[in-house]
Amino acid sequence: MDRIRIRGGNELHGTIPISGAKNAALPLMIASLLTDDTLTLENVPHLADVEQLIRILGNHGADISVNGRRERQQGDSYARTIHFTSRNIVDTTAPYELVSKMRASFWVLGPLLAREGKARVSLPGGCAIGTRPVDLFIEGLSALGAEIEIDGGYINATAPAGGLVGARYVFPKVSVGATHVLMMAATLAKGTTVIGNAAREPEVVDLANCLNAMGAKITGAGSSTITIEGVTSLSGARHRVLPDRIETGTYAMAVAMAGGDVVLENTDVALLDTALEAIRRAGAEITPTNNGLRVYRNGGGIKPVDVVTDPYPGFPTDLQAQFMGLMTRSSGVSHITETIFENRFMHVQELARLGAKISLSGQTAKIEGVPRLKGAPVMATDLRASVSLVIAGLVAEGDTMVSRVYHLDRGFERLEEKLTRCGAEVERVSE
C-alpha cells in the first residue's frame, strides 16, 4: 500500500494547474444514463472515484471511451475527454460490491428510475464522515410518484406505469446529492417539478447546464428553487467540467501554511469566495489573475480565524479539515464549527500526533496555535482529512509519513507532482 512522505520546511513557489472538479464530474457522468446518445465530457480528472464510476456505468451497459492521448491544457495541466454512450441499459441493478466503495454511485438511482422505470440500488458507502441517510432521496423521488422499498440493503424503486410525474418538493435539509438525483429524475418526468430548498453549489449549476445542453428545461439552478419542465427524451451533448474549487482552496491553504508565492491556474475565484476570504484573514494575499488566482504569504505569521461550515455559499465542509491544518500554526486560538456532517473531526487525533493542540466540544473544534509541528507517522481517515495532514506536514520539522493515501487518490489528481514542482519535498513511497 502506498504512503506519502513529506519533508517540511520549504516555501512554495511556482504554478499549480487546477484539475476538473470531482464533485462535478461524477454527477455529469451519471447523467449519461438519461440518454441513448453520446455525452462527451471534457476536463475530466484522473481519480480513483472517476475510475470506479466508469466501472459502475459500464455495468449498466454504458459504452465508455477515453481519448487515447491526454490533451494538453493551458498551464501544463492534463485532463481527459471521455465519451459516454448508454444506448442500451442492460442492468438496472447497482450492486453492493460496487456502490459500497463510493457514495456518489448511489446517484444512478434517479436516471435509471426515470429512463427505465425501475432501479435496484445498494445502499451507499464512501467516506466514514457521518451517517448521511438516504431519506431525502427517497422522499424526493416518492414525490414524483415512485414506489420505493428497502429490502436486504437495497433500495427497490419503481415508477408509475406512465412514468414519473412532476411535483413540488421542498427538501427539509439542503442536500447536494439529493438535489442532483431529483433534478436528473425530473428531466424525464411528465409535467413540471419544483425543487425547494435546493442545494446552490456550483456543481449543481454545472449539472443543470449540461442537462440543458442535452435538451432539458431547467431554470433556477444556483438558487434555492429549481424548476424543471419534463421532456420526453434527452440528446447527447459536449460539456466541459468546471474547475475544482476544493482543490483550489486546498492549494491556497497549502501556500498560506508554507509561505511563498504560487499561481493557481485554470480555476475561478468566484467559485469559493467565502473560503478565500477566510484564507485572506489568516494572512495570505490572494489576487485574481487572467485564468486563476495568485496566493502569496511571505514573512507575516498565520492569524487565527473562526469559521463555521455551511451549505454554499458558506464555508465548504470539504475544506474544513484543511483549514484546521492551517490553524494549527496560527498565532492564537481559532474555532471551527462543523454543521454539515456529525463525524468529520477524525483528523484531529492525527494532527495531534504532529504536535497540534486541538480540543473538541460537540461539533466545534478549538485550535490553539503552536510555534512548531514535528513530523510523525499519521494515517488518513477520509479524503479531505488526508490532505490536511499533507498541509501540516509541509511545515513540520523532519518527515511526516501519511499512510492509507488511497483516500487522497480519490480526490486529488497528481498531488505530489503539483506540490513538488513548487519546491515541496513530497514523494510517494510504495511498500
Image: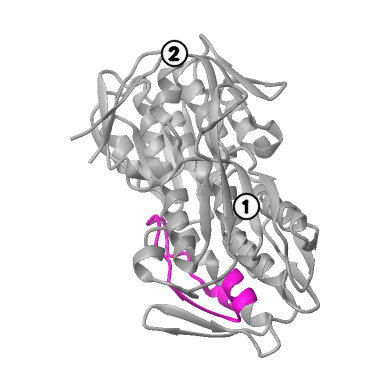
Task: Check the image and name the residue furthest to the left.
Answer: 431
Q: In which quarter of the image is the C terminus?
A: top left
Residue 63, how many percent across, how many down?
Answer: 52, 59
Residue 278, how many percent across, how many down?
Answer: 60, 32
- Residue 11: assigned label: 2
Task: Please check the rendered image and state whether residue 425 is part of the magenta-colored stretch, yes or no.
Answer: no
Task: Check the image and name the residue furthest to the top.
Answer: 299
Rendered position, 342 above or below 366: below
Q: In this view, does 58 lie to the left or right of 17?
A: left
* Residue situated in front as seen by the camera: 251 or 58: 58
The residue lying at 44 percent from left, 40 percent from top is: 321
Report which quarter residue 213 is drawn in.
Answer: bottom right
- Residue 389: assigned label: none
| Callout 2: SS | loop
Q: In this view, does 279 lie to the left or right of 379?
A: right
Q: In which quarter of the image is the N terminus?
A: top left
Q: What is the span of residues highlighted in magenta in the rendered image?
A: 110-138
The residue lying at 60 percent from left, 66 percent from top is: 87
The residue lying at 65 percent from left, 37 percent from top is: 272
Task: Please check the rendered image and state whether residue 118 is part of the magenta-colored stretch, yes or no.
Answer: yes
Residue type at numbered disc 2: Glu
